[in-house]
Amino acid sequence: MTGWLEQEPLLRLIPFVGIFVLMALWEIMAPRRPLKVAKPYRWVNNLGIIALNSLLLRLIFPGAAVGVALFVETQGWGLFQLAPLSEWAPWLKLIIGVLALDFVIWVQHVLFHAVPALWRLHRLHHADQDFDVTTGLRFHPLEILLSMVIKAGVILMLGVPVAAVLLFEILLNATSMFNHGNVRIPARLDRWLRWLVVTPDMHRVHHSWYPEETNSNFGFNLPWWDRLLGTYRAQPHDGHLDMTIGINQFRERRDLRLDRLLIQPFVAPVRNYPLPAQSEDGFPNE
């Protein structure tokens, strides 16, 4: 049992670093859009908050989600531990566990857009004025901790297998870096690919400053929930090259600084982005 906990950091770190480097190189070789803000300035601050989040998670949740899953398994808790679910084949429990966690993250994402107090935390992710691999990892520390609590509760209730939790955590990090990538994918390939995974062009719509586009395409990993539940939007109103990334409250260069990011939930009103916000006449609300 302890072997999972001992190997978990390495099993997550290797694909994380590999995919981050690949996406960063892809962004240099085939960028989808020109950046509005110099990459070194944004990256220093975005990577700073990513490092802080990683440190806090390890201090507060040393075993992370895998540790919770191990504890739940040893206690025999959760729906997966009850007959007849406990008798299912391991591969079936693995698939269902990953799907269940992905749907929960989708619901959580919608809630962070719907509840004004939660939007205060989540808007840091949307306030980035460009869209690249670091955006996919840029979240306020309080959101990261709250997300872990929600995830732990779901694992506790369902008894999701350890392997499914570890696989989901790896996939979530990988796909978040991929679908936030400032990378160019041929349109024909993108049309097919977005049936299987959230693509950068699909998720970029979610980072538009139009409220009705911000409140669409909530998926990080799988694209099916948005299609099934009516929140899918194929393309941005202004097109991918001309669309404005971010939200209309934080447009100054100084708003991208690490210190400003950390205090962002506690400053400025919530305004009009929480669901079911819509802009008037096709223009962003002011």
Image: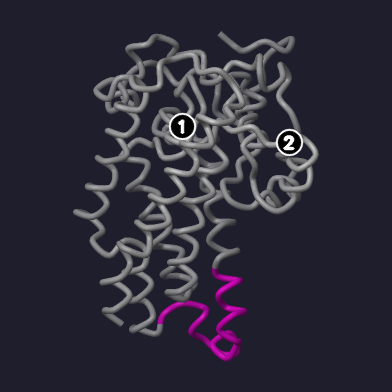
The x, y position of residue 15, in whole percent, is 43, 56
Determine the image quadrant of residue 240: top right
| Quadrant location of the N terminus in the rendered image | bottom left
- Where residue 74 appears, as percent x and y from the top left, is 34, 84
Q: Residues within 10 Å of mark 2 (few under 14, many from 20)?
A: few
Checking the image for residue 186, the label placed there is 2
Q: Quadrant of residue 124?
A: top left
Who's the residue at 45% across and 28% down the image?
123
Amino acid type, residue under disc 2 in the picture = Pro
Most common secondary structure along the magenta stretch: helix
Three-letter amino acid code of the residue under disc 1:
Trp
- Label 1 SS: helix
Q: Estimate the x, y position of residue 217 in percent, counting from the top left.
A: 65, 38
Front residue (pair 160, 94): 94
Instruction: From this view, report whether residue 156 is shown above or below residue 271.
Output: below
Q: What is the magenta range?
A: 77-97
Q: Which residue occupies 73% across, 41% down?
A: 190
Numbered label attached to residue 119? 1
Q: CA distance from mark 2 to mark 1?
A: 33 Å
Q: Nearer the viewer, residue 31 or 282?
A: 31
